[in-house]
Image: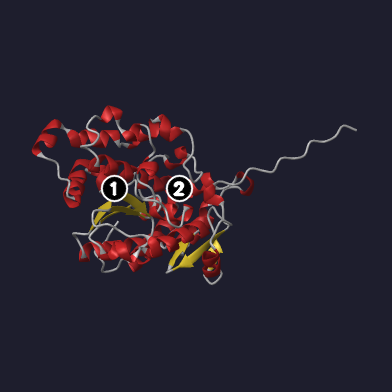
């Protein structure tokens, strides 16, 4: 008989699926937290009233203890699938416009927005004490963390926070599609009905959605110089208006010369969904955490929920929104 070659071990799962590379301290805390089935990973854990994967929890936990905010920092905050990639591009293009005046040779043409504006919790999940010395002022970071889970240094400093929210129905449908792309093939896709019930109960990454949004909405009313609250649908409708608002809020207003030259239109064109989604850097390859870059670009449309949700689903969402957002002044 011919000798059989030894079987090579299977490749390790991508980082976003890994659940065993945790510190002992995080393992100990996780054992005490409420747990539910996850959308991609095996479980979600409830920490400070919101749901996290084990890896996201480790990043959040370490970031809370160790991240030291600077007063010039800018933090982009979103609930997952609320236009994060688009706003990362806009924020990077806006803040760095004097460094890269030629949009034909811009970093956004060669790098994915998630590489240019990294998630804080991912930096601290990869390394409990990440080296942030290469970030020049103003440092740009993003996070999905709910307000109660932000590091104290962020909440007490003068750093700016940009919050972008999206209609909960479009957010839900986008999240369903996105998480199905990330699930291992062997376990199959989640049904819309199954994750709909979980989303309504708040059991989704960084959920409950309504509590996440409401926390930052109230913070923007109480601290308008620190938190600006943007709506995805309004930005799509009047991008120039809200780019101007964002520039003023961050302390980088457009000069009359920049306005006359049409620089705002150039930035918006560079960061448009059509342009970003058709760049080779966003169509091929993976992020350092293992997600395929193309998974972050699906349709980016307003109202896509109409193609998937039943009238009963819409009614349930409306009831939850009415209950959760009552007397807050926030409407979708």
Name the residue: 30% across, 56% down.
332
Answer with left or right where residue 318 lies relative to residue 264: right
Give the alpha-carbon distance from disc 2 to disc 1, as whole Å. Answer: 19 Å
Quarter of the figure with the N terminus? top right
Q: Position of residue 320 (x, y in %)?
A: 38, 64
Q: Is residue 255 visible?
A: yes
- Crowd tier of the residue under label 1, counting other residues whose Cα lies within 10 Å: few below 14, some 14–19, many 20 or above: some
Q: Which residue lies furthest to the left in this view?
A: 256
In the depicted structure, whether residue 28 falls above or below residue 144: below
Q: In the shown orientation, is residue 18 left or right of residue 107?
A: right
Q: Is mark 2 on a helix, strand or loop?
A: loop
Locate residue 57 relative to residue 301 in the image: left or right. Answer: right
Q: Which colour scheme is used?
A: secondary structure
The residue located at (27%, 53%) in the rendering is 73
Q: Which of marks 2 and 1 is in front?
A: 1
Residue at far bottom of view: 32
Work out whether mark 2 precedes mark 1 in sequence or the reverse, and give the earlier one.
1
Residue shown at 42% from the left, 35% from the top: 282
Residue linked to disc 1: 233
| Residue 202 visible somewhere in the drawing | no
The spot of residue 210 in percent (x, y) is 36, 62
Residue 86 position by quadrant:
top left
> Residue 290's x, y, as percent?
51, 44
Q: Which mark is residue 188?
A: none
Q: Which mark, by number, is residue 308?
A: 2
Locate residue 133 relative to residue 31 in the image: left or right.
left
Rendered residue at 35%/54% (across/down)? 78
């Amino acid at each position: 008989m011919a000798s059989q070659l030894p079987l090579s071990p299977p490749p390790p799962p991508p980082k976003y699926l890994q659940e065993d590379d945790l510190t002992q301290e995080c393992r100990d805390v996780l054992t005490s937290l409420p747990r539910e089935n996850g959308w991609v990973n095996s479980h979600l854990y409830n920490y400070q009233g919101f749901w996290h994967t084990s890896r996201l929890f480790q990043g959040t936990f370490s970031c809370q203890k160790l991240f030291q905010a600077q007063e010039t920092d800018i933090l982009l905050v979103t609930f997952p699938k609320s236009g994060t990639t688009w706003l990362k591009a806009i924020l990077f293009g806006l803040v760095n416009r004097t460094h890269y005046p030629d949009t034909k040779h811009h970093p956004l043409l060669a790098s994915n927005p998630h590489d240019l504006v990294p998630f804080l919790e991912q930096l601290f999940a990869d390394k409990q004490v990440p080296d942030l010395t290469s970030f020049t002022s103003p440092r740009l970071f993003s996070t999905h963390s709910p307000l109660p889970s932000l590091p104290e240094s962020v909440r007490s400093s003068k750093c700016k926070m940009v919050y972008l929210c999206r209609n909960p129905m479009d957010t839900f449908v986008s999240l369903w599609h996105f998480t199905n792309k990330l699930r291992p093939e062997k376990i199959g896709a989640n049904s819309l009905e199954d994750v709909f019930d979980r989303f309504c109960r708040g059991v989704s990454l960084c959920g409950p959605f309504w509590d996440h949004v409401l926390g930052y909405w109230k913070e923007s009313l109480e601290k308008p110089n620190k938190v600006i609250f943007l709506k995805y649908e309004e930005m799509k409708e009047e991008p120039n208006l809200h780019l101007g608002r964002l520039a003023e809020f961050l302390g980088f207003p457009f000069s009359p010369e920049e306005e006359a030259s049409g620089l705002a239109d150039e930035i918006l064109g560079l960061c448009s969904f059509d342009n970003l989604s058709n760049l080779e850097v966003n169509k091929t390859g993976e992020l350092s955490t293992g997600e395929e870059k193309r998974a972050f670009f699906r349709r980016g449309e307003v109202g896509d929920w109409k193609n998937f949700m039943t009238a009963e689903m819409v009614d349930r969402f409306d009831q939850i929104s009415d209950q959760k957002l009552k007397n807050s002044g926030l409407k979708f």
